[in-house]
Image: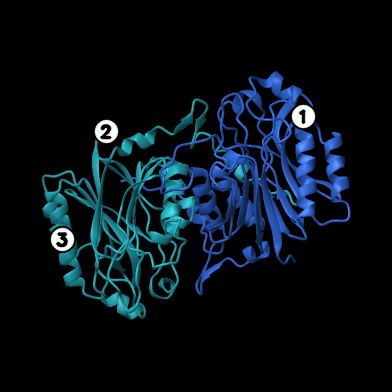
Chain colours: A blue, B cyan
Amino acid sequence: MSGITRVRCDQLAPALGDVEGNSDLVVASVERALADRVDVLVLPELATSGYVFRDRAEALRAAITTTDPLFSRIQRLLDGTDTVVVFGFAERQRERVRNSVAVVDASGVRAVYRKTHLWDRETLVFDAGDDAPPVVDTVHGRIGVLVCYDMEFPEMPRMLALAGADLIAVPTNWPVGEHPERDRVAEVIAAQATARGNGVFIACCDRAGTERGQDWNEASVVVDQFGWVVAEAPRGAGSTAVTADVFPTLARDKSTSPHNDWLGDRRPALYRREVPRA
Amino acid sequence: MSGITRVRCDQLAPALGDVEGNSDLVVASVERALADRVDVLVLPELATSGYVFRDRAEALRAAITTTDPLFSRIQRLLDGTDTVVVFGFAERQRERVRNSVAVVDASGVRAVYRKTHLWDRETLVFDAGDDAPPVVDTVHGRIGVLVCYDMEFPEMPRMLALAGADLIAVPTNWPVGEHPERDRVAEVIAAQATARGNGVFIACCDRAGTERGQDWNEASVVVDQFGWVVAEAPRGAGSTAVTADVFPTLARDKSTSPHNDWLGDRRPALYRREVPRA
């Protein structure tokens, strides 16, 4: 059972196609995290490859497998620690190219998840995964994994919450979007509602660094189980780390009143009924 | 097909148990709405009865059926208009007492929905409904109905969006809650994320008026299909009306990029798969 857990989203700025340089960025981030006693480090979607690929062939050239030396470099750094690293990478899987996330700890690669909901031109570049998102049991609580656009489908975080996730780690690349001054960016609002509605912690790690003219929200955020922001990237901060100390296992208490429970109050049979039309 | 549609949430302050007085409040609100050319009027949850019942017996005394004269009074007022009224009432249904919402237009009662997710002490007072929420086809678009806590279960608005709802009307009684100054109240954040994630308009009508020491967020809000607030009750305004002109049928375009669609991108088979545990 976890106690206080230091969660960090390190909003890196990978360079498109520079796998070697990006791998060094990832390793340096892990080193900083260990120096700062971070327990759960979340890095951006496609941290090793960059994002704005022209086509599938270009993405394949920047794709790696989990036998890539980067994974063993991270594992070696984590040796003797309880720290968990969640990071995005372009993955070559036989003939396919995936938008994947790995969960790595001192024991090695604990899980790989392949993004199942592809955003915009990703549909031309990547092969969508077909497997459900995983929940990884760690000393810091049970960590569920989604990638960016996946989180916008409430079915996805719901699956993870029902499978016992305490904290959902969401590597993202959020293309910059307009929003009213009064409001946070739309994706953060989605994260807040998702966290609250499932009673889970959520850590979204966005990225920085303009890529082929594309900018990002740079809005990395850690949200508590009530849906409130506990740490966030200052607007326009670029490549920066967002760190929060939280208690992920508090997510196991889903009670919201003496008579209510976020998950217990669900009515699955009702959700399968037909909507009456008048 | 609807054009511009004037949507109003009239944040009334019903008095506990005063069915006659509250019915007059509702009627007066309908009259004001007609004078102001409102097309869709949403009123609070339990507008005819008040909310903070001590027990079931007290709620039953304030419960009415759809044969109550109030319904024909509203229908007569709406005669010759296209205006639709959505309001909450405590309903006596044989031996049961429901937290219900009626959708009424010039043709009469189009639909009655009985709240299926009961909040806190409502579980001691009301019988939860067992039927799916309805979608009512009107000249102002297809109107789905939920009641307050129902909206917090993403399965519910999803059902309505999949059934073609353009606008979801949500009579609510939101008990006052704390929130960071930077953020809107949690329920409004939920409405924003729900509207955006389903590409639908949402109109939540909260209430005013302290009842047995209970205050309310008084945070009635109309949210557009992108999740942004287009009209909201000023903080602390008490009993006030919130009005917005919107185009509900814009909700039928679910495209979010040249390659994406909020509903089309769903992967229902995936959502039924087992979450892998590591």
Would you identify the image quadrant in which residue A247 lies?
bottom right
Disc 3 is placed on an element classified as helix
Disc 1 is placed on an element classified as helix
As drawn, B95 above or below A222: below
Residue type beneath disc 2: Met
Tag 1–tag 3 contact (CB < 8 Å): no
Tag 1–tag 2 contact (CB < 8 Å): no
Q: How many marks?
A: 3
Tag 2–tag 3 contact (CB < 8 Å): no
Q: Is residue A197 visible?
A: yes
Residue type beneath disc 1: Val
Q: Label 3, on which residue?
A: B27
Label 2 neighbour load within 10 Å: few <14, some 14-19, many 20+: few
Q: Label 1, on which residue?
A: A19
* Chain letter belonging to callout 2: B
Q: Label 2, on which residue?
A: B1
Question: Could you tell me residue A122's position as x and y percent?
Answer: 61, 28
In this picture, residue B193 sits left or right of residue B272:
left
